[in-house]
Structures are given as C-alpha cells and as structure tokens.
Image (cartoon, grey):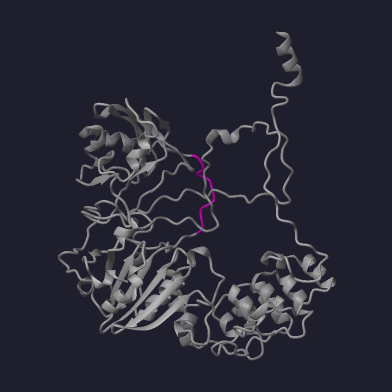
Amino acid sequence: MSERAATLAAMGFFEGLTTPDPEPVPAPPEEFRLPRYAPPAADGGEEHPPEQWFAPAWVEQLAEAGRGAEARIMVNGWEVYRHSATLRLNVFLRVTKSGGGLHQLWQRSSGGLRCGLLFADGRRITTLDGQPYPGGSGGRPTLSLRPGMGGGHHYAVNLHLSRLPPEGDLDLVVEWPDQGVPETHTGLDAAAVLAASRRAVEVWPDLAPPPARRGLGRGLGPVVPADVVVFSSSGGASDLLAPRPAPQPYSPPAPPPPVHEQGDWEGLGRTAFQDLALIRARMAHGADPEHRFGEEGTVLHLAAECGSAEVVGELARNVADVDVRSGFYGDTPLWRAVCAGNADSVAALLAAGADAWTPLVAGRSAGSLALRTPMAPLVKALPGYVPLTDAERAEQADADADALVFRGIHTEGVSVAFVAGVSEEDVVRRLGSDPERSPVLDLDVEPGPYGTGPGGFDPYEYETSLRFLGVTGVEGGCVVVQPMGYRASTPAVLAALSPGARAYGLYFNPKGGTFGRLSVDGRDELQEEIGMRPGADAPEPQWLYRLWSWGRGETAWSARELAYSAAMAGLRIADGAVVSGPPRRWVELPEGSALLKW
C-alpha cells in the first residue's frame, strides 16, 4: 500500500469532502405517503406511466423505423406497464446546427417529426392528436411525448401510449419532412406487448388504498385525492449523493420576526394572528384591541378571518363589543369567521357572547349563513334558532349538487356562456355559421390537430382561438365555451345569443378577477365581479350558491361560480364536461362579424 493510500485509509477516504448537515428545522417536513395504485377506469387510460408503482417489463425490438439523408430513426422496444406502455425511439442526426437540435422539431412546424400507431381495428393514434382542454381524451388512447435524454447528434424519444394496443397487427408510422424522411411503416409485435403487461411488477401492492374518489365526467382523467401528493424529482440518482462542499452556501435573507415589544399593530402579517404570545405581548405594550383598520373593520375582524381560536378568544375578552361592525360591509367578527370557514373561531366568538341571529347584510345573519354549512351544529343550540324549512334544505342540497358537477375543472383564462331556451343548432346560426359548416365532431374517430377535429386550430394560440367558440347542447339550452379567451362572455356575443332567451357569460380573467354578465332578450341586465363579498344588492343565487364562503378547497374554487352562472341563465348542468371537455361543435366567427369587434 502506498504512503498516500495508507494516509487515506487512516483518515477515511471521503474525509474533508463532505459538508456538515444543516441545522435541524423546528418541525420535520411534511410527509407524503404513496397510496395504493388505482388502475384506470375500464374506458379510460393512463396519461402518464405509473412509474411510482411499477417496475415495467421490457419488450426488445431493434429496427430502423425511418431514414433520411442526414437522419435515422430507430425503434428500440417497449417499456410495458399493467395498462399502458412507452415506446422508445432513438433519433440520430448526422448534421446539427449551432443552437439547434431536436428541440426545434417540437415547435409548431408542419415539417417536424411525426409519429403514430395504426391499430388492428383501424384506429390511428398520433403525436399530432391533442386536447384543447386539460383532462385527457375520454376513452380514446393518446400518444404523448415523455422526457428523454440526448443532445447534439442523438436523442431519445419516448412515446407513452395511454392504453395497451388491441390484439392484431400494429404499425409504427413515422414521417419527417424537414429531414427528408418519407412516411415509413414498421410492424410492431402487439402480442409481445400484451404478454409483457402481465409481467410488470407492482412494487407496493400492500399500500393503503386511496380515499374514495368521485368521477368528474366525460373528458376528465382520474383525480388524485387532495390529501395524497405524488411527486418525482428531476435530479434522478444525483439526489441520493452527498453534496460537494460549498465554502459559503447561499442562504436567502429571512424576514425579521415580528417585534413583541411594540405598542401597536404595525408590521404584522395575517399569520401573526395565530400567535397568541405575540398578540398578548403587543396588547401588554399598549396596542389597542379596539383598533380599526379603516373601513375593513377591527383587529377582531381580522383575527376572526385568519387567526387562531385562542387569539380570537383573547381579543374578544378585551373589547367592549364583540359584535362590533365594520364600516364598509356592516358585518361582525362572527360573520367574518363564518365566511372564512373558521369553525373554531366561530365557537370562540359564540362562547364570548357573539350574537348569531341579528340580520346584518341583505337581511341575513351570521347564524343563517352557518346553518347552510358544516358549522350548523354550533348555532342550532342557541336561543333564537329557527331551522331551515324542508324546501330550503332541498334547495340548498340542489345548489350544492350543481356545484359538485364542476368540481376540479381548470378555469384560468376560460370564458363560458350558459344559454337557456335556445337549441345547439340555433346557437350556431346566431353566431353567424350554420350546422353544416360547424358539424358535430367525432373525436374518437378523427381527433384532428390539437383534438379540435379535422382541419382544427390550436385553442391556445391566442389570436387564432379568439375567432372560435365551442358549442354543446344541453337539456334546456346550450353551453358556449372559449378555452383561452374572453369572447364567450362579451356583450355582443351574449346579445346575439339571448333574443327570446337568457344568457349568462362568465370570464375567469388570468390577470385577476372573475366577471359575469347577464343578457335577457338581447339586452344587458346585469354586470358583476364575482368573488367579492355579496352586498345588499347581490342576486339571490349568490347566497344560495354560497359565493360568500371563502372556506372551500382549491378544487372547488370555480365550481360554485360556474353553477351560479348556469342558474342565472336558468339551466341545471348534469355533466361538467360541457365546460372542461371538447365541445360537440366549433364555430368560427366569420371575417367582419360584429361579434369580433368587442
């Protein structure tokens, strides 16, 4: 053994290279537990490979799948799971350009690389297929690009097939006009893929099952429960290695902690009202528990919204009037706590003598709001309690069921119009087209580019997509949607849709705010920003659909707004896919149409 080797052996091979562990955090990080694998529905598929749960089987097939003067495309084989599979291709380029490479192919170029599969039953699944909305394609298989390695002269192209192929012939078809690769068919072994699916190994078969999940209708894929988080790291195996030493690791500056020894409420964020010791210290140094933050209300109002029950109780014991009203809305701390869904704070305020039954806004009391929520038991035992009638309970149950239909739908940037009393064909005509020029689409047979049908458009290319409106008939009327634009909610479109009818348009502005508009018989009747606190002049359905409630889960945030909008038009929607899924028809607004001028 050399002298250096002996020295390293004595001191430890890695000594001097490792970094000390960071200081322990006060509380351990949140733990995310993997649930048991949930297979797709019988008519569904897996948009992503279930690599969190399975060690896939491998089907090798090494063959040339396409050839050009400066390019070769090779098929390598299949990575096969229980219900889906990933086809692995390798692309070789003899010549590349500086700053170029395969990433250029996936830009919107008509001459880019195209890949597809031809099933034995005649179905054609390609990388040109797409979906105009999030949530998958219903029962139709999809072929989607997965992350791959490579650069320069070689790239791995991994194509995930969301459902296993049917028995029989299976062809891989590639074409690459930019590289001179003609349309080329390569036979694949579907039987080997199906056999391999039975060999895929489920790594964690004994995991706890996920909570029961509610289906979300046509066009939406499986839903991960809210309390289950499945994630993966892009760092790969490097995440498992000890880090290299960093002489002076960068630590972003932390905001200064709130000062306890201060006699006012300055410098406190909303989370500070969860710290009882801090609030007590401020009051001990002279902070006024009756302090008002302008028209928004008092310290107790703010604590009722976002503070802990302990802080609410402490402040309530130090104010003269626990039912103090804000200047602008005229609401009390109890009203705020009910609206925020803070049940513990509601209980603390009631224990401090808060009045649940005095009408505050639009003839409603804090108790009457609570009766329509899971907080109802807190107020039922109070003097003055008047139960909801059977009709009121049924009406509220119907409204909650209406909202559940839209739960989990992505709405950022979406506009939608609910139209009552007009058929799908008449809506098409009122938009300036006719049913023959805007035929009913069969996307299972011919999805077309981006899933918008033959000759379709990119629904997320803003300027182009503003000319197109999706139209789907429903019982009693029709739904008009624009997946990335405001057009379905404009006064001109609503006026065109509503002669002899009612139309309510809703726009989820990605820059902020949700805006609604009601048109009756071609005339504007109401304009409103939804999501503000309802006031005395708010339409009755805003209360019924609980738009006053801020204590709702993230997946329900737009659901009540959509249900409210349908109700304002006079419709009840049975399937949220009329908003989230591909429409039955696309209408292109004619050049020069007055509907394009707004």
Q: Residue at x 59, y 83 (%)?
A: 329
Q: Position of residue 306 (x, y in %)?
A: 65, 70
Q: Position of residue 3 (x, y in %)?
A: 73, 9
Q: Quadrant of the C terminus?
A: bottom left
Residue interval drawn in magenta: 203-211
Q: How many marks?
A: 0
Q: Residue at x 68, y 44 (%)?
A: 251
When asked about the image quadrant of residue 430, the answer is: bottom left
When asked about the image quadrant of residue 198, the answer is: top left
Q: Position of residue 577 (x, y in %)?
A: 35, 64
Q: Position of residue 249 (x, y in %)?
A: 68, 39
The residue sitting at the left extreme is 436
* Residue 152 is one of the magenta-drawn residues: no
* Residue 205 is one of the magenta-drawn residues: yes
Whether 261 is drawn above or below 163: the answer is: below
Q: Nearer the viewer, residue 445 or 241?
A: 241
Q: Nearer the viewer, residue 156 or 442?
A: 156
Chief SS of the magenta region: loop
Q: Nearer the viewer, residue 595 or 244?
A: 595
Is residue 174 among the parts visible in the rendering? no
In the rendered structure, the answer to whether residue 526 lies left or right of residue 24 reads left
Q: Nearer the viewer, residue 338 or 50?
A: 338
When asked about the image quadrant of residue 63, the answer is: top left
Is residue 598 among the parts visible in the rendering? yes
In the rendered structure, the answer to whether residue 29 lies left or right of residue 572 reads right
